[in-house]
Image: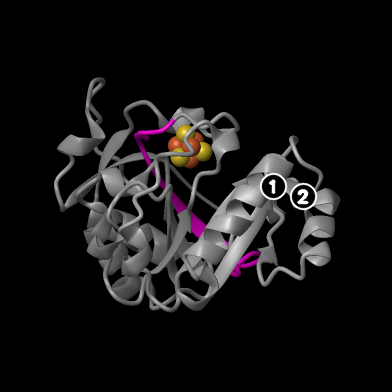
């Protein structure tokens, strides 16, 4: 894939609909949704408006490289991966994210996921895209960041994820999901342990104890040990 020369101080917000500012692309296993385990072509867009306590991708904070949308879609199709995903950083900071998602759908004919931190309007994404939306818990340090208007923008195939740091986060997430009838609004409600902070078995015990209709979601790529 040919990368256009980036600008050292390029702001992700400056990228137009035909271009996105990219941190990196790579093929790996999807690890954080009901699609976990499938091969996936990842497009990590640059820039994030949060600084979560457990963030494992600080490389996405800085400026990336401007890449035309068609080149990324061609690369996804050529990768042979079972699906593609736009992630970040926060991909919805960029105007070109929706156009990229649309082009990926057209060109690959395979599932397209967009992972978002829940702070930006998800309704800009085209039909057919699956949004995997975080609701940030207090333990993230960004617990007040969620745009609650996104709850009514969820589509049936979308998924909502809580990354849980501790028992307090678990109770907070459980109450949030119940208060907003989340299980009826989307395809899956994912409870994921913050990696290295909460043992997956502990979170599993809480979910079983409470017969919670959430899905335990262990970040598969970290368990397997691939990026
Ligand atoms: S939203 Fe994601 S990329 Fe941004 S700081 Fe939080 S974990 Fe990191």
**Which residue is label 1 attached to?**
226
Q: Which quadrant holds residue 48?
A: top left
Q: Residues within 10 Å of mark 2 (few under 14, many from 20)?
A: few
The answer to whether residue 104 is above or below residue 32 is below
**Residue numbers of the magenta segment:** 34-50
Q: Residue 167's x, y, as percent?
A: 73, 43
Which element is circle 1 on? loop
Q: Residue 218's x, y, as percent?
A: 72, 55
Q: Residue at x 34, y 59 (%)?
A: 150
Query: Which marked residue is nearer to the observer: mark 1 or mark 2?
Result: 2
Q: Which quadrant holds residue 103?
A: bottom left
Is 7 one of the magenta-colored residues? no
Q: Residue 152's x, y, as percent?
A: 33, 68
**Which residue is label 2 attached to?**
223
Q: Residues within 10 Å of mark 1 (few under 14, many from 20)?
A: few
Q: Residue at x 16, y 36 (%)?
A: 14
Looking at the picture, the colour scheme in use is one colour
Under 8 Å from ligand 1: the CB of mark 2? no
Quick check: marks 1 and 2 in contact, CB under 8 Å?
no
Quadrant of image for the C terminus: top right
**Residue 176 visible in this rendered orientation of the protein:** yes
Is 35 one of the magenta-colored residues? yes
Q: Residue at x 50, y 66 (%)?
A: 159
Q: Residue at x 46, y 29 (%)?
A: 51
The answer to whether residue 12 is above or below residue 151 is above
Which element is circle 2 on? helix
Camera-side residue of 1 and 150: 150
| Alpha carbons under labels 1 and 2: distance apart | 8 Å
């Amino acid at each position: 894939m040919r990368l256009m020369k980036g600008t050292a101080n390029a702001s992700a917000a400056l990228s137009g609909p035909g271009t996105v500012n990219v941190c990196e692309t790579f093929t790996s296993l999807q690890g954080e949704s009901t699609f976990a385990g499938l091969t996936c072509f990842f497009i990590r867009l640059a820039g994030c408006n949060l600084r979560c306590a457990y963030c494992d991708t600080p490389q996405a904070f800085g400026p990336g490289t401007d890449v035309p949308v068609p080149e990324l879609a061609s690369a996804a199709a050529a990768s042979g991966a079972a699906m593609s995903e736009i992630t970040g950083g926060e991909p919805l900071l960029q105007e070109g994210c929706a156009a990229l998602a649309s082009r990926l759908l057209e060109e690959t004919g395979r599932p397209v996921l967009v992972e978002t931190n829940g702070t930006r309007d998800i309704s800009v994404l085209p039909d057919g895209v699956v949004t995997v939306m975080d609701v940030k818990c207090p333990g993230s340090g960004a617990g007040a960041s969620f745009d609650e208007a996104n709850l009514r923008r969820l589509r049936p195939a979308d998924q909502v994820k809580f990354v849980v740091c501790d028992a307090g986060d678990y109770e907070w997430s459980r109450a949030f999901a119940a208060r907003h009838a989340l299980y009826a609004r989307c395809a899956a409600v994912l409870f994921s342990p913050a990696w290295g902070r909460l043992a997956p078995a502990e979170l599993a015990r809480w979910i079983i104890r409470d017969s919670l209709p959430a899905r335990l979601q262990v970040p598969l790529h970290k368990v397997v040990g691939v990026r």
